[in-house]
Amino acid sequence: MKTKNLIPVLFILSLSTLFAGTGLNNGMSGQKTVTITNKVGENLMKFLSDAPLEKIAGTAKGITGQFKIDANNIEATTGTLTVEVLSMKSGVSKRDEHMYGDDWLDAPQFPNITFQILKLESVQVMHDNGISNITATAVGKFTLHGVTKEIKIPISMKYVKESESTKKRAAGDLVMISAKFNLALKDFNVKGKSGIVGSKVGETIQLEAALFGSTGE
């Protein structure tokens, strides 16, 4: 083949390499559907408000969701995760009532917080005793208090292929995800009562999630 005829071929090959997705590289192929389930572990979201006059820490356990991961192209991961606002607890019932009210999260009108995963970026995969350890940035649409913003969340994910030991907890492959990020209340039009945000409630809320899922649900 003449050199000039090789140029288009090499160009196409370089493009295919550039846009090729990252694989799990664990012998799997095709798309897997992962469902969030407490059969694997307790799904939990922690939230922290650190303000000059008060520090508030709480948790939310009403977490559901499902996402699809392509074993040959992890970047193409998509799905939706949902947190029920009424499952958020700060340890003080009266304070929780205020949090659910229309001055704050307005649970009756906006009962759920959601994160729609559009794709993963900066994917890296390492293997350790049959476990695929993945780090990535999840790009998606975060909806809180009726406001949707596109954000990026750094995540760590462990993917464990089904084995005799994992069958005891849930059928299918197991997936564990952890994430830690911050949200500014003003970005989601959460204003609270006058003078509270910035003094007793932090302008930025720290969130930390621990999620567990299975392909067998």
Image: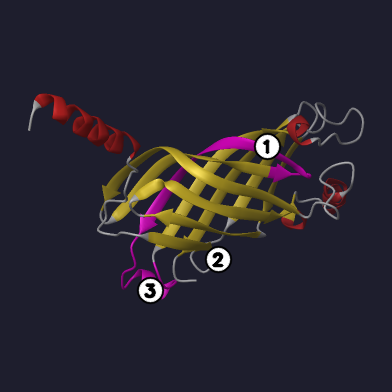
Under circle 2, the secondary element is: loop
Residue 167's disc is: 3
- From the viewer's perspective, is 194 left or right of 173? right
- Tell whether position 165 is magenta: yes
Under circle 1, the secondary element is: strand
Proximity of marks 2 and 1: CB atoms separated by less than 8 Å: no
Please give the residue where the numbered disc 1 appears in the rendered image: 149
Is residue 129 depicted above or below 22 in this figure?
Answer: below
Proximity of marks 2 and 3: CB atoms separated by less than 8 Å: no
Which mark lies nearer to you, 3 or 1? 1
| Residues shaded magenta | 143-172
Under circle 3, the secondary element is: helix
Which mark lies nearer to you, 2 or 1? 1
Q: Which amino acid does label 2 sit on?
A: Asn
Q: What residue type is labelled 3?
A: Lys
Please give the residue where the numbered disc 2 appears in the rendered image: 38
The residue at the point 40 percent across, 69 percent down is 172
Does label 2 or label 1 sit earlier along the sequence?
2
What is the distance, in whole Å, between disc 3 and disc 1 at their CAs? 38 Å
